[in-house]
Image (tube, rainbow, N blue to C red):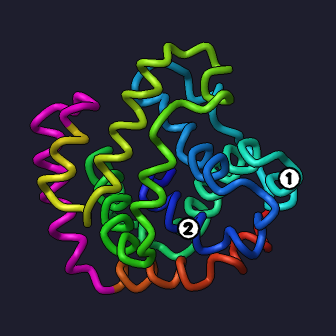
């Protein structure tokens, strides 16, 4: 999986090319909705698809397209990471796995400059989110987490607030930040992450 910032940035990169007929607000909110499961309100099997292709996501309405695009990005990223070896020897435990995803956030955040627009999309719960029979206050809680996450360039301080709300153990957070500090110095990993962004359209179109 990717974190929310990465989902937004990658979605923004390809939105006009592949999803220009969709409503932006619904698409982007949907593209981050599946990970509401981290609040314990849904199981992963209720929010994620094990198989997905670009044409399948494109045929949906705005929210459905964003929802399926979330899984597509997760799957494409996992395949890319395995094939390019930037998981090898690094991704042994959950803290290292998360640190790799947070490095993507740091690299990708400044690739778009319309974060105020994106943050505005999360002012209130959408009807599709409510259709999952989740308490609206929990949807609002998720939106608030994302708004905080999107507000500024990722840093130890901004992550600490998200980690606190998600109730990550302090030791886990410390290890994650330690690994992340190391990964920033890994030139091969940074290069591969940038190449994933650059080649995203090709990766999506050729994923089966």
Residue 71 position (above or below residue 77): above
Q: Residue at x 61, y 28 (%)?
A: 129
Residue 107 position (above or below residue 156): below
The residue pinned by badge 2 equals: 10
Q: Residue at x 68, y 53 (%)?
A: 69
Total numbered badges shown on the rendered structure: 2
Q: Position of residue 174 (x, y in %)?
A: 10, 47
- Badge 1 element: helix
Q: Would residue 116 be found to the left or right of residue 152 on screen?
A: right
| Mark 1 surroundings: few (<14), some (14-19) or many (≥20) residues within 10 A | some
- Give the Cα distance between marks 2 and 1: 18 Å
Q: Position of residue 43 (x, y in %)?
A: 55, 22
Q: Is residue 185 magenta?
A: yes
The residue pinned by badge 1 equals: 56
Q: Position of residue 7 (x, y in %)?
A: 52, 58
Q: Quadrant of the C terminus?
A: bottom right
Q: Is residue 103 magenta?
A: no
- Badge 2 element: helix
Q: Position of residue 152 (x, y in %)?
A: 26, 62
Residue interval drawn in magenta: 164-187
Q: Would residue 162 be found to the left or right of residue 136 on screen?
A: left
Q: Quadrant of residue 18?
A: bottom right
Q: Nearer the viewer, residue 107 or 119?
A: 119
Residue 153 position (above or below residue 166): below
């Amino acid at each position: 999986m990717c974190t929310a910032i990465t989902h937004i940035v990658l979605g923004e990169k390809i939105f006009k090319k592949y999803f220009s007929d969709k409503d932006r607000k619904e698409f982007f909110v949907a593209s981050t909705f599946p990970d509401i499961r981290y609040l314990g309100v849904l199981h992963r099997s209720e929010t994620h698809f094990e198989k997905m292709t670009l044409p399948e996501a494109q045929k949906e309405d705005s929210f459905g397209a964003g929802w399926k695009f979330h899984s597509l990005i997760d799957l494409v990223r996992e395949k890319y990471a395995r094939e390019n070896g930037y998981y090898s020897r690094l991704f042994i435990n959950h803290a290292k796995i998360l640190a790799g995803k947070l490095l993507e956030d740091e690299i990708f955040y400044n690739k778009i400059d319309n974060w105020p627009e994106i943050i505005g999309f999360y002012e209130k719960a959408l009807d599709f989110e409510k259709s999952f029979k989740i308490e609206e206050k929990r949807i609002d809680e998720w939106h608030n987490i994302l708004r905080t996450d999107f507000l500024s360039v990722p840093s130890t301080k901004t992550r600490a607030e998200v980690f606190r709300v998600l109730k990550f153990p302090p030791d886990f957070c410390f290890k994650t930040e330690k690994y992340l500090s190391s990964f920033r110095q890994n030139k091969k990993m940074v290069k591969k992450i940038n190449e994933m962004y650059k080649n995203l359209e090709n990766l999506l179109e050729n994923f089966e």
